[in-house]
Image: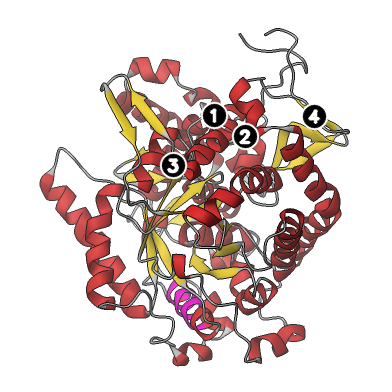
């Protein structure tokens, strides 16, 4: 196989490993589809990312995000989005996870209404993970996917009844360094979207979408101009393959603080291609920290205290429900990150009870469905939503939440209450390093302390540590009155690394990338300027270039 290379269109260079399976995904026609998207939209994407930087400069100078007076007519208008496709009217429980082969099968078989297959925060974007993920999704859409687990001597296949498939592409900011188009890295989300759409739109619409689809989740948006680009991408894709406008549908994650003031505008830009909004609450906390990185009066307490009971979080959820239902769309709830605790039935039941309470709060507030990180949670969540929704698929017409129209900028920005503790600093450090160590070795969805963690958790840990160090905050919650300093942080890192080694065992610690992760995480927490995303810095560590024309035997 030496000398075999991908057959690429003009201006495309592939630097990832050659593989026959990958070559079926990276066909010349599929690559041309991606290239056309990249060439048409790259300048708009660059402009949108520049606008993000300009907005952050304003926040760093003391400005606060808020509703845009120039789009008041959109917020006040009586328009609605396109009708919800019948195939996805019922979305009571959605399971999320990476595009790993066994995970795809288990998630589609889980009993959830929807599986969100993730190329974003639950995936470490190595070349192998991305390309195998595309292969796995193509097999899943065809209905032919299977997996032989040799350790258990068990074959996994799809059930007759499966969840509807949504795909989450990467955010606008992430490059795909293994594919160069006209000499520069491709935009990661256009690669994810373009390859998946090109290979699967026809079969998906016939077998899953009831004439609609494919379906997507769109992450990390900060402004409606970014939704407008996605809408144009969808229209171009539909035109290119000759399907009706409005076939492609997407749910936007409202997981940045600036985006909460743009929810109407985001739905308006995507109105023919929308299928609702979702409360991405962990990333929302990360975004609150990042947006107010220079506001010493808006520091958050320990992250375990920043839940939906906080006024600014509850206001965000309530306004999202009101906005979606007013526009005829689903309002999806947040992630239940708990995972079953197999060796402790009492702790497991306590964790399940927390999940039930959280989901009961969501359904009573008006959410139409919610997220789970593990199949073991689905029966409990399904029971809560089904019981409260009776025989209806959703609450779009019945729970308008008109009083939420009065939610103000002050409500959405209200300072959270709580305390900061040494344990909070330690947990941030321990979780951040362990997540990053897994990510560097190709795993983006990591079970830690009975929770399924993804990149959002590591981001909260990193930015909160950075902020506490920058402002030398008092850890006022445990009566010690200790100030956070570089010296204290250095000692905490050392002690937490020893604890991690004890918890995972000497052998795993030696083989893992804990030391590299520690170095990267520490550098990020102590940097003079806060990086926008931890994964952008870490990405260079997982890019492996193969000389074009070579093949790994």
Cα distance, mark 1 to mark 2? 7 Å
Residue 431 point in image, percent of width and height = 42, 40
Instruction: Point out which mark residue 538 bears.
Output: 2
Residue 90 point in image, percent of width and height = 39, 68
Tell me the crowding category of disc 3: few under 14, some 14 to 19, or many 20 or more residues within 10 angstroms, Cα based. some
| Part of the protein shown in magenta | 312-322
Q: Cβ–Cβ below 8 Å for labels 3 and 4? A: no
Q: Nearer the viewer, mark 3 or mark 2?
A: 3
Q: Is residue 215 above or below residue 73?
A: above
Residue at 66% x, 46% y is 198
Residue under numbered circle 1:
440
Residue under numbered circle 3:
143
Indicate left or right for 4 with 10 as reference: left
Q: Nearer the viewer, mark 4 or mark 1?
A: 4
Q: Quadrant of the N terminus?
A: top right
Instruction: Point out which mark residue 136 bears.
Output: none
């Amino acid at each position: 196989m030496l000398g075999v290379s991908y057959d690429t269109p003009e201006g495309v260079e592939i630097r990832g490993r050659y593989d026959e399976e990958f070559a079926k995904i990276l066909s010349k026609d599929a690559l041309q589809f991606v290239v056309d998207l990249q060439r048409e939209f790259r300048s708009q994407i660059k402009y949108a990312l520049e606008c993000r930087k300009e907005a952050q400069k304003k926040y760093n100078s003391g400005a606060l995000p808020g509703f845009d007076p120039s789009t008041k007519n959109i917020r006040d208008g009586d328009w609605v989005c396109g009708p919800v496709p019948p195939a996805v009217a019922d979305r009571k429980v959605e399971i999320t996870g990476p595009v790993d082969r066994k995970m795809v099968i288990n998630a589609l078989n889980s009993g959830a209404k929807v599986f969100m297959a993730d190329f974003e925060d639950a995936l470490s974007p190595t070349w192998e993970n991305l390309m195998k993920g595309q292969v796995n999704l193509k097999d899943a859409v065809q209905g032919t996917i299977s997996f032989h687990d040799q350790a258990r001597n068990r074959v996994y296949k799809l059930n007759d009844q499966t969840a509807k498939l949504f795909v989450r592409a990467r955010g606008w900011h992430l490059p795909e360094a293994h594919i160069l188009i006209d000499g520069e890295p491709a935009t990661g989300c256009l690669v994810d979207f373009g390859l998946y759409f090109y290979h699967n739109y026809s079969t998906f619409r016939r077998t899953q979408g009831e004439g609609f689809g494919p379906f997507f989740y769109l992450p990390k948006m900060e402004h409606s101009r970014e939704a407008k680009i996605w809408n144009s991408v969808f229209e171009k894709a539909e035109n290119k393959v000759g399907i009706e406008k409005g076939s492609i549908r997407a749910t936007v994650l409202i997981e940045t603080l600036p985006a909460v003031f743009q929810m109407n505008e985001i739905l308006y830009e995507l109105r023919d291609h929308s299928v609702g909004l979702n409360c991405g609450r962990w990333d929302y906390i990360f975004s609150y920290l990042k947006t107010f990185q220079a506001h010493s009066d808006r520091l958050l307490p320990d992250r375990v205290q920043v839940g939906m009971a906080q006024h600014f979080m509850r206001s965000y959820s309530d306004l999202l429900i009101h906005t979606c239902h007013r526009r005829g769309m689903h309002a999806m709830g947040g992630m239940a990150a708990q995972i079953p605790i197999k060796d402790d039935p009492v702790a497991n039941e306590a964790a399940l009870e927390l999940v039930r309470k959280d989901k009961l709060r969501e359904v009573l507030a008006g959410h139409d469905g919610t997220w789970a990180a593990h199949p073991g949670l689905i029966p409990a969540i399904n029971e809560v939503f089904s019981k409260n929704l009776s025989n209806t698929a959703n609450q779009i017409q019945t729970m308008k939440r008109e009083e939420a129209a009065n939610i103000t900028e002050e409500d959405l920005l209200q300072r959270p209450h709580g305390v900061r503790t040494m344990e909070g600093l330690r947990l941030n450090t321990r979780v951040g390093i362990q997540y990053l160590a897994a990510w560097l070795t190709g795993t983006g969805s990591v079970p830690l302390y009975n929770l399924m963690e993804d990149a959002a958790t590591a981001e909260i840990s990193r930015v909160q540590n950075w902020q506490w160090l920058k402002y030398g905050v008092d850890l006022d919650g445990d009566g010690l009155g200790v100030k956070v300093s570089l010296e204290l942080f250095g000692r905490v890192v050392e002690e937490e690394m020893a604890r991690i080694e004890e918890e995972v065992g000497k052998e795993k610690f030696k083989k893992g990338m804990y030391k590299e992760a520690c170095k990267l995480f520490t550098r990020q927490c102590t940097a003079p300027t806060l990086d926008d995303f931890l994964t952008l810095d870490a990405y260079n560590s997982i890019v492996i270039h193969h000389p074009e024309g070579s093949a790994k035997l």
